[in-house]
Amino acid sequence: MKVGIIGVTGYSGSELARLLLRHPEAKLVAVTGRSAAGKRVPEAIPYLWDLDLPITESIEESVDIVFSALSSGASAVALAPMVEKGVKAVDIAADFRIHDAAGFKRAYKVDHPAPHLLPRAVYGLSEIHRAAIKRTSLVANPGCYPEAAILALAPAVREGIVGDHFIVDGKSGISGAGRGGLTTNTIDLYAEANENVMAYGLDGHGHQPEIAQELAELREAPSAKVTFVPHRIPMTRGILATCYAPLVDGGITKKKVRELYREFYDGEPFVRVPELPPQTKHTLGTNYCLVYPTVDEQTGTLVVVSCLDNLIKGAAGQAIQNMNLMFGLPETTGLQGLALYP
């Protein structure tokens, strides 16, 4: 299949290109990048020396699928004309994750640029929405934090063993902010990021309604109460989320919870329930998410630790996983790499 990437010069876009170069069924034929338009890929992204394509301002080549790695708001503008022409699309930005335009505006403080496309979009968490992804032509790739949180809580929520208030404590490497970093906090400067941890989004973060939306659907309820606090930590990539929810039955044991989680994710190619609490380096460079559930027996609270690589399972790898589903390919195609360790 012929593939295009809109926004190849950012972290997610360049990671997409790197993975697609080794995908046996994909041929990358067009890439865009507004600041680097007119250059060839190796000039702007030297480590992609095998991808000798021109970087253009827009995709003019005929493609079977297009990925957008632009910022939220700009992504829908770029994708809309192509989707309307029948090109399949995966949006790595947030533009199609929230189901309604009003909810998108509350989360991101801007009007949605293509609200007529929202009913066509499927939330691209394949472990939950696999069948719908196979049928759609427009996928909203999950946010990295929400993916870690939803995969951590989905089995417990689906089985109804927890109440309706969820706490998600998320920690991300600096690449999660994109190449621009959190410039308002100058966290992209090494001297201020190194040996420093910061919480942000305390007055509301765009990922909170995304998590709440998906957990509510799993509960088959109109809403879910989610407290979400993200943190930026001094490492390059990786997400570790610790999620909490009250158990509805004080008699539920750690053993029972682990059995439930293992059964829920049995057969899933990219989710593992390990024997020991996971670390971010256990998923570095992979499309895997590790999910470790336990129980605080003193308080009757479910505690789940999950981790993933924010640029792969949390972005580019998940996007390719969705592409594979959309084209009827084995879901793992091009994504079987193991972790880089240490």
Image (cartoon, rainbow, N blue to C red):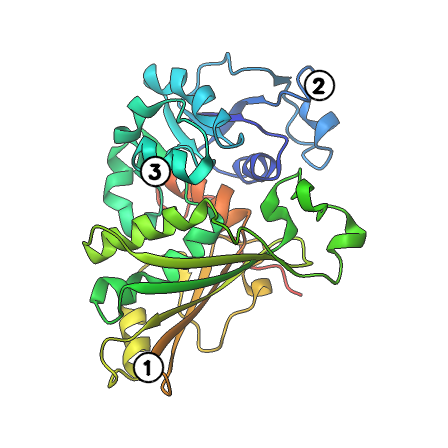
- Tag 2 and tag 1, C-beta contact below 8 Å: no
One can see residue 258 in this view:
yes
Q: Is residue 187 above or below residue 254?
A: above
- Quarter where residue 148 is shown: bottom left
Residue 88 in picture, x, y percent from top left: 36, 26
Q: Estimate the spatial distance between the alpha carbons at disc 3 and disc 1, rounded to whole Å.
A: 33 Å
**Label located before the other in sequence (2 or 1):** 2
- The residue wearing badge 1 is 300
Secondary structure type for disc 2:
loop
**Left-right relation of 290 to 164:** right
Task: Please name the amino acid that badge 2 sits on.
Answer: Lys
**Dot label at residue 103:** 3
The reply to whether dot 3 and dot 1 touch (C-beta < 8 Å) is no
Residue 61 placement, left or right of 176? left
Q: How many marks?
A: 3
Query: 279 or 61, which lies in front?
Result: 279
Q: Point out the frontmost of discs 2 and 3.
A: 3
Q: Quadrant of the N terminus?
A: top left
SS state under label 3:
helix
Circle 1 residues within 10 Å: few <14, some 14–19, many ≥20: some
- Residue in the image at 50% along x and 58% along y: 229
Q: Identify the residue shown where x is 37% and y is 88%.
A: 298
Which residue ends up furthest to the top in the rendered image? 60
Kind of residue at disc 3: Gly
Q: Which mark is residue 39?
A: 2
Closer to the camera: disc 2 or disc 1? Answer: 1
C-alpha span from label 2 to label 1: 58 Å
- Residue 68 image point, x, y percent: 48, 29
